[in-house]
Image (tube, rainbow, N blue to C red):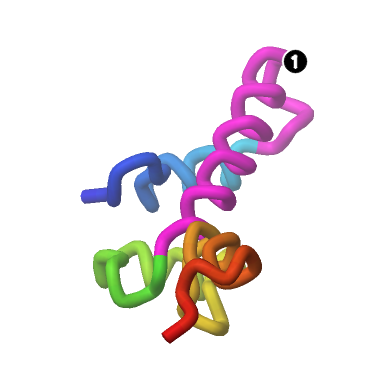
Amino acid sequence: MSDTGRQSLTDKAGAALKPDSEKSYLEQGTDALKGKADSAASSGQPESQKSYTQQIGDAVSGNSNENQESIGDKISNALGGNKQ
């Protein structure tokens, strides 16, 4: 099961296992868009709110949030919205 807005591990593996030389231009473009959307969704969600499988998938693909802060939190902090 994948988190909302995220690619499943099965979809990621399927896209990675098929060589680009065997994909149509449409498939290559779709894979690229899905990958960018998944990466953005990963960055926008704190690690503490991810499912176990997504944490593993992100660790393998390099999409983990090292600081555990979502993009929304980063923006709010930058604008001074989270000051105590």
Quadrant position of residue 57: bottom left
Main SS category, magenta section = helix
The structure residue drawn at horizontal position 40% and vertical position 69%, both measured from the top left corner, is: 46
Q: Is residue 10 left or right of residue 72?
A: left
User: In the image, is residue 37 above or below residue 57?
Assistant: above
Residue span colored magenta: 19-45
Q: Position of residue 39 (x, y in %)?
A: 57, 52
The one nearer the camera, 46 or 54, is 46
Q: Secondary structure at mark 1?
A: helix
For the point 41% across and 43% down, which residue is it? 7
Residue 56 lies in the magenta stretch: no
Which residue is at a point 63% across and 20% down the rendered structure image? 27
> Nearest the camera: 28 or 83?
83
Q: Residues within 10 Å of mark 1 (few under 14, many from 20)?
A: few
Which residue is nearer to you in this view: 30 or 42? 42
Where is residue 55 shown, x and y percent of the image? 38, 71
Instruction: State yes or no: residue 42 in magenta.
Output: yes
Which quadrant, please, contains the C terminus?
bottom left
Q: To which residue does mark 1 refer?
A: 25
Which residue is pictured at 30% across the width and 43% down the height?
4
Q: Amino acid at mark 1?
A: Tyr
Query: Residue 9: where, in percent of width, then height?
Result: 38, 52
Residue 50 picture quarter: bottom left
